[in-house]
Image (spheres, rainbow, N blue to C red):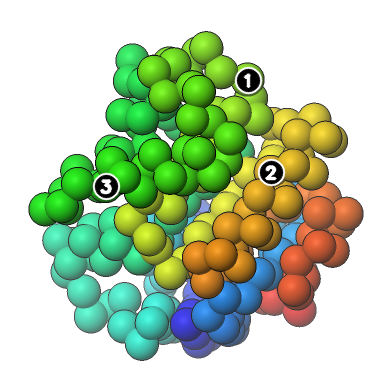
């Protein structure tokens, strides 16, 4: 479902971060990306997530060449096909749990409220619908962020250190949830993590070294 062919990326004034990187992910596969701080993992995820563009090389998602899409098409593609979870939840503080998870669905003609309720129930948060993010625990906030990422039934979930702000138990629980949802929703999951323990629970681990994946 994802094919990356020889991508290169260099930030202004810096040395090259990605240097002819290749990567393939199948539908439904779970892949961990590990590597030293600053090696380019978030850069790679941003490029896959269409938030940034490579200087060279090709990225295909579900057979669509991202370079062929204009800004508007990219935004629609991202909204429909890709879910994001980051280290910090990035929830809107003034909105309720239910409102937060519905944000990505606002562009859709049909209501996503039924799915939102089902997913929130699935992650054990049906009793927290009206809470604000500030009234939730760290683990609960990340579960809301996961539901928000899944609301539009994406085929790809990108997670950049989603457990980075959680304790070990919270991290294990979130990992379990992500793996269960990956199976239930037939999602591909690409997760950046610093934890080899968590990485080992995914189908495959790739390491970023010198701007390439090994
Ligand atoms: N917008 C930017 N402008 C210039 N340099 C950048 C920018 N974003 C990242 N970099 C640099 O590119 C390199 C790769 O950054 P990236 O965030 O992808 O690393 P990472 O592997 O995700 O690191 P970490 O594990 O610490 O999150 C770093 O040296 C970083 O300083
Ligand atoms: Mg990073």
Work out whether residue 208 can be spotted: no
Location of residue 56 in the rendering, given as x and y in whole percent from the top left corner: 42, 79
Q: In the rendered structure, are the residues bearing label 2 and label 1 in contact, judged by CB atoms less than 8 Å apart?
A: no
The residue singled out by tag 1 in the image is: 137
Neighbour tally class for label 1: few under 14, some 14-19, many 20 plus, Cα within 10 Å: few
Whole-number angstrom distance, CA of label 2 to CA of label 1 = 13 Å
Work out whether residue 187 can be spotted: yes
N-terminal of the two: label 3 or label 1?
Answer: 3
Residue 176, compared with residue 67, is above or below; it is above
Q: In the rendered structure, are the residues bearing label 2 and label 3 in contact, judged by CB atoms less than 8 Å apart?
A: no
Element type at mark 2: helix
Image quadrant in which you'd find residue 82: bottom left
Q: Nearer the viewer, residue 102 or 23?
A: 102
Numbered badge on residue 174: 2
Location of residue 11 in the rendering, given as x and y in whole percent from the top left corner: 48, 57
Numbered badge on residue 49: none
Whole-number angstrom distance, CA of label 2 to CA of label 3 = 23 Å
N-terminal of the two: label 2 or label 1?
Answer: 1
Q: Residue furthest top?
A: 135
Location of residue 160 in the rendering, given as x and y in whole percent from the top left corner: 59, 50
Residue 195, compared with residue 171, is above or below; it is below
Image quadrant in which you'd find residue 142: top right
Q: Residue at x 53, y 80 (%)?
A: 27
Whole-number angstrom distance, CA of label 3 to CA of label 1 = 25 Å
N-terminal of the two: label 2 or label 3?
Answer: 3
Numbered badge on residue 112: 3
């Amino acid at each position: 479902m994802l094919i990356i062919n020889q991508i290169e990326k260099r930030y202004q004034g810096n040395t090259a971060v990605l240097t002819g990187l290749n990567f393939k992910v199948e539908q439904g596969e779970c892949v961990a990306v590990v590597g030293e701080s600053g090696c380019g993992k978030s850069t790679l995820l941003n490029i896959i997530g269409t938030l940034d563009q490579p200087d060279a090389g090709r990225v295909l998602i579900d057979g669509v060449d991202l370079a062929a899409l204009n800004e508007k098409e990219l935004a629609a593609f991202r909204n429909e096909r890709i879910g994001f979870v980051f280290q910090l939840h990035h929830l809107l503080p003034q909105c309720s749990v239910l409102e937060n998870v519905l944000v990505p669905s606002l562009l859709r003609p049909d209501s996503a409220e039924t799915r939102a309720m089902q997913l929130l129930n699935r992650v054990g948060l049906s009793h927290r619908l009206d809470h604000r993010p500030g009234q939730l625990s760290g683990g609960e906030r990340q579960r809301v962020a996961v539901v928000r990422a899944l609301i539009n039934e994406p085929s790809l979930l990108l997670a950049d250190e989603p457990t980075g702000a959680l304790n070990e138990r919270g991290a294990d629980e979130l990992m379990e949830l992500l793996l269960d949802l990956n199976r239930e929703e037939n999602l591909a999951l690409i997760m950046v993590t610093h934890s080899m323990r968590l990485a080992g629970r995914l189908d495959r681990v790739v390491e970023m070294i010198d701007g390439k994946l090994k």
